[in-house]
Image (cartoon, helix red, strand yellow):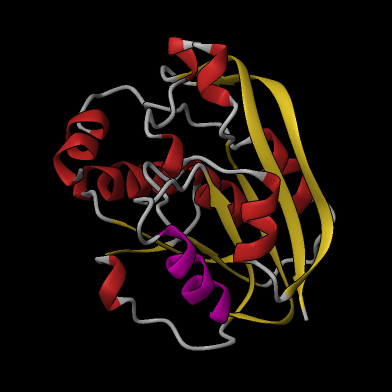
Amino acid sequence: MKQFWEDRYGKEEFAYGEEPNQFLKEQLANVEPGTILFPAEGEGRNAVFAAELGWNVSAFDLSSEGQRKANSLAQKKGVEINYILDPISHLPYAENQFDAMALIYAHFPADVKSTFHKLLSSYVKPGGIVIFEAFSKNHLALNNEKAGGPKDINMLFSVEEAQSDFSNFEVLYLKEEEVELSEGLFHNGISSVVRFVGRKK
C-alpha cells in the first residue's frame, strides 16, 4: 500500500489537484480557525488550504512523496504546515489536542478502520469538529473508473458506519450523496460519497 502511494504521488502533477475538497471548503467557512489534524493527507491540498485560512495545521501520511509535495505546495502558497511521516501505530498526538479534524478520502484497511477512527477521534477536544467525506459502499455500483476509490467494498462507507465510528459526536450533517467530483487526475465524475460533520460530546 505504501508503494502504491509513493508511485502515485511521485509524478510531477498533483494526483488530486491543488485545490481543496469542496465539502471541506464549505464546512471550514463555518468554523473559527484553531488547531486541525489531517490524517492520510497525501499531497497536502486540504491542509494547505486550511493553513491559508489561518488554521494551525498538523498532518500525516505514510508517503514521503506526498509529504514532499505538500511542503512544496505550502511554500508556494506562503504558509506552514506540520506534516509528519508516521505509521498509524506511532502517532505523536495527545488526547483532546485539536479543535477539528478532517478525514477527506482517508480510506483505511477494513480490519482497522473503525478502531483507527476511534483513536483519531480521541485527539479532538470536546466541542471540536470532525469533517468527513469518503466513498460510499454504493460507489462501486456506479462503475466510474475515473472517480477512483478502493475496490474493496469493506473499505467503503455507509451512513450507519460513519455514525457508529463517531458515536461520541453530535451529528451536524450526515448524508450519502451522489456528487460530481473534479479533483485532479483521479477523482472525476459522478461518485457516491458519505459526508459527515460532527461535534464531539
Rendered residue at 63%/51% (across/down): 132
Describe residue 79's horizontal placement relative to residue 83 as left or right: right
Describe residue 186's horizontal placement relative to residue 121 as left or right: left
User: Residue 100 appears at what percent x and percent y?
Assistant: 65, 68
Describe residue 31's horizontal placement relative to residue 49 as left or right: right
Rendered residue at 14%/40% (across/down): 3
Q: Nearer the viewer, residue 193 or 47?
A: 193
Which is the main secondary structure of the residues drawn in magenta?
Answer: helix
User: Residue 30 appears at what percent x and percent y?
Assistant: 85, 55
The answer, for residue 187, to whether it is visible in the render is yes
**Is residue 165 depicted above or below 176 in this figure?**
below
User: Residue 63 appears at what percent x and percent y?
Assistant: 23, 49
Rendered residue at 68%/72% (across/down): 34
User: Residue 195 appears at what percent x and percent y?
Assistant: 70, 43
Instruction: Give the quadrant of the N terminus.
Output: top left
Instruction: Give the quadrant of the C terminus.
Output: bottom right
In the rendered image, residue 47 lying in the magenta stretch gets the answer no
Rendered residue at 76%/63% (across/down): 198
**Is residue 94 depicted above or below 132 in this figure?**
below
Describe residue 164's horizontal placement relative to residue 200 as left or right: left
**Highlighted range, magenta:** 113-122
